[in-house]
Image (cartoon, rainbow, N blue to C red):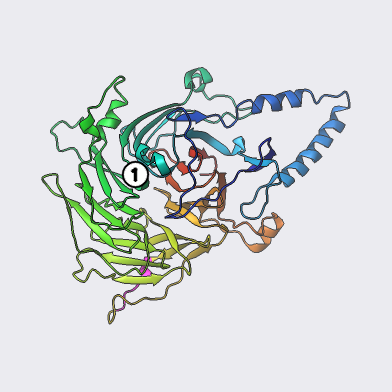
Amino acid sequence: MSKRAADAADDQSAALKAGERPIAEDPPDEVGEFEDEFEDEFESEDEILEAGVDGRPDAEREEEEREAEAMDVDKQTFIPGRTKLAPGETLSPDPSTYDMLHTLSTPWPCLSFDIVRDSLGDNRKTYPATVYAVAGTQAEGSRAKDNELMVLKMSGLSKMEKEGEESENESDSDDDMGEPILEHKSIPLGSTTNRIRSHQTPTQSADYNKPPQTLTATMLENSQVLIHDVTSHLSSFDVPGTVLPPSASKPLSTLRMHKAEGYALDWSPLQPLGKLLTGDNDGLIYVTSRTEGGGWVTDNRPFTGHSSSVEELQWSPNERNVFASASSDGSVKVWDVRSKSRKPAVDVPVSKTDVNVMSWSKQTSHLLATGADDGKWAVWDLRHWKPNAAAPSSQISASPVASFDFHKEPVTSIEWHPTDDSVVAVGSADNTVTLWDLAVELDDEESRQAGMAEIPPQLLFVHYMESVKEVHWQAQMPGTLMATGGNGFSVFKTISV
């Protein structure tokens, strides 16, 4: 990430934790559009380089340019939480570090989104790329009635052009790539979305070509949880001109068990029909299950034990009856849904501040990552979390296997790489998404020699975007991420992952 002068003053704003929202500005006229981060920038730089031939000997001029460039790079290195932007400066991404980078604006900021698995295949590395997602808007104040669930298709996502790099074949040319395209379908909600997650169930039809049913669960500011079937919305993108009936926007179920709003929500990956965890600001956790007949039943006995709001819930990736919760009381608790006491089996204090986010590794099921309000994030080995046989719900002490305090603002999102259990993506209120590789080791002497004593060697990459709220990996496109913030979405892939 580098700095460059700009006409407008720096307008950074910190990302907000659960329960706090940025002030929504008037929405743009367009429902959603892609923005060109580099429009006109490359042309102007080329013109400057061509104009630099001033008649001096090439060797003299080139040496001076190398020295100036070295000084310029040193001055322009941006370190989150340490480097301060001068008045009139803003940040600009370095295109040489990205394999792909696209930005997307929406009518209102989205506090939460989820990537939807598609039928285009796994391990996709070719361009142009396509990403499907669902998101919930935050239209505040008198415009709250305009809030909606957006079903998105982003296609034509091209590879980043790099100076001096030629296309491997003619199919990668600009003419064939075209412009990125955003398509969307909207479902009215009438209230701000605090958290949204998608879930796919196997088709119950004899027609094996029929796509899986895609469900969404949306936690609203008004404390309700809505479950929608967005299968027809996703399918309509492949049939231009499709008009969906009003019934397609009606929720399958509206859950009203919560008396306070909440932000914690997760679908079980091991319950195909659909099993949902929801947690609220009163510290209560409910389980809602889908019946064989297609109905939804909520167990009215909440799980209790947190003394403050439940910020995150995660089902175990390999045990269908186990889940974990993170809370602003600074603890992570592990539960068994079969427990008659509705109390946690394991209770571990992991931070002296709010634990905002949590991620359970899908590759190594005993690894759990947490992110806290003090900017620290850590990795825990659940094999060391042994419940107390005499008092199962009592707190136990544990130490993380890795801990980082690089971010100086709250961690707002964290997610393990879908196939590499050493790589983690972290979103922070310092307006960055950072990528980390836990397998990297570098001793102190090497760090000093490299001039990076303050930079953890495990830090791979820093992506800047305003007011980062959530970040997710696109599991079918290795190394590709999508993030949401105050100015919309970023879809990007770095050369380092």
Instruction: Tell me if residue 392 comes above or below residue 216 in the rendering.
Output: below
Q: Position of residue 92 (x, y in %)?
A: 62, 38
- Please, is residue 127 above or below residue 495 in the view? above
Nearer to us in this view, 220 or 413? 220
Indicate left or right for 379 with 215 as reference: right
Q: Which residues are magenta?
A: 382-388
* Residue 431 pos. (x, y %): 55, 48
- Front residue (pair 396, 480): 396
What residue does disc 1 label?
191
Residue 303 seen anywhere in this rendered image of the structure: yes
Residue 287: % across, % down:
23, 57
Closest to the observer: 477 or 166?
477
Q: Residue at x 73, y 46 (%)?
A: 74
Q: Secondary structure at mark 1?
A: loop
Residue 357 image point, x, y percent: 42, 57
Q: Residue furthest front?
A: 142
Q: Is residue 318 left or right of residue 170?
A: left
Kind of residue indicated by mark 1: Ser
Residue drawn at 33 percent across, 77 percent down = 394
Residue lying at the far bottom of the rendered structure:
390
Q: Is residue 122 visible?
A: no
Q: Residue furthest left?
A: 293
Residue 169 shown left or right of residue 472 in the figure: right
